[in-house]
Image (tube, grey):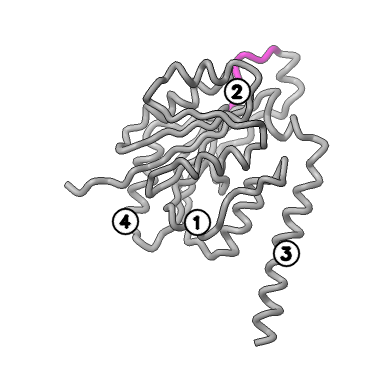
Amino acid sequence: MEQKPLVSVLIGAYNAAPYIGEAIESVLGQDYRPLELIVVDDGSTDGTGDVARRYGDAIDYTVQENAGNGAARNRAVERAAGALFAFLDADDRFLPGKLELQWAALADDADLDVVFGHVREFVSPELTDDERATIRPPAPPAPWTAPNLMLIRREAFVRVGPFSEALKVGVTVDWYARALEAGLRTTMLPSIVLERRLHLGNNGLRERDSRSQYLHVLKASLDRRRARVEESDAT
């Protein structure tokens, strides 16, 4: 049988000690092989590193000074050896069979660059009733084009380029906008492939004061598209 390509699963983690063990287990429990798991600790000040190091040689664990989620993901990409990339936040979980299902779609279509899937949200079970009242309820399962949902060919990721390291929020929105501009060929599977945890430390809650950056991300994308149209008209 033909050898499957190596999948690099890439996790950027910051103060995720209560959850990163579940994230790691959800990756190591995948049926797909060959597989490597790279965890970049973005300068955590809790026990994130203690939890990650318990997995020994089963993962590639490294620490960097705190520089943000985009920088942590980019560092993980630099360490990755796989022909395929999958991303996961340290507080979320892959569903069983996620990688195998998405690889099958890529294997069936050599021209396909990226495979996405559906997400299911859940409220983290350790929250008290008062804490639950401070966050929104889980949304119904839905398709999602965030990097956490995708399996992407390495060369396609390179065409888009690295994650922004200047943004505190909107990092994934910015990356996907550039993926569309690069003309990546994508497909959306009908299956739920990711469980997204809702808790008090979600990035959108931590970085409330930076939410205006979403507008900058959208404006930058529109400006790039306008520039290309003007360049095309000029020629």
The residue pinned by badge 1 equals 158
Q: Residue at x 46, y 34 (%)?
A: 38
Say whether marks 1 and 2 touch (CB < 8 Å): no
* Dot 3: element: helix
The span from disc 2 to disc 4 (Cα, nearest Å) is 36 Å
Residue furthest bottom as drawn: 235
* Dot 1: element: helix
Residues shaded magenta = 122-128
Say whether marks 4 and 3 touch (CB < 8 Å): no
The span from disc 4 to disc 3 (Cα, nearest Å) is 34 Å
Q: Position of residue 225 (x, y in %)?
A: 68, 69
Say whether marks 1 and 4 touch (CB < 8 Å): no
- Badge 2, how many Cα within 10 Å: few under 14, some, many 20+? many
Q: Which mark is residue 23?
A: none
Compare residues 145 and 217 and report the one nearer the observer.
Answer: 217
Of marks 1 and 2, which one's residue comes earlier in the chain? 2
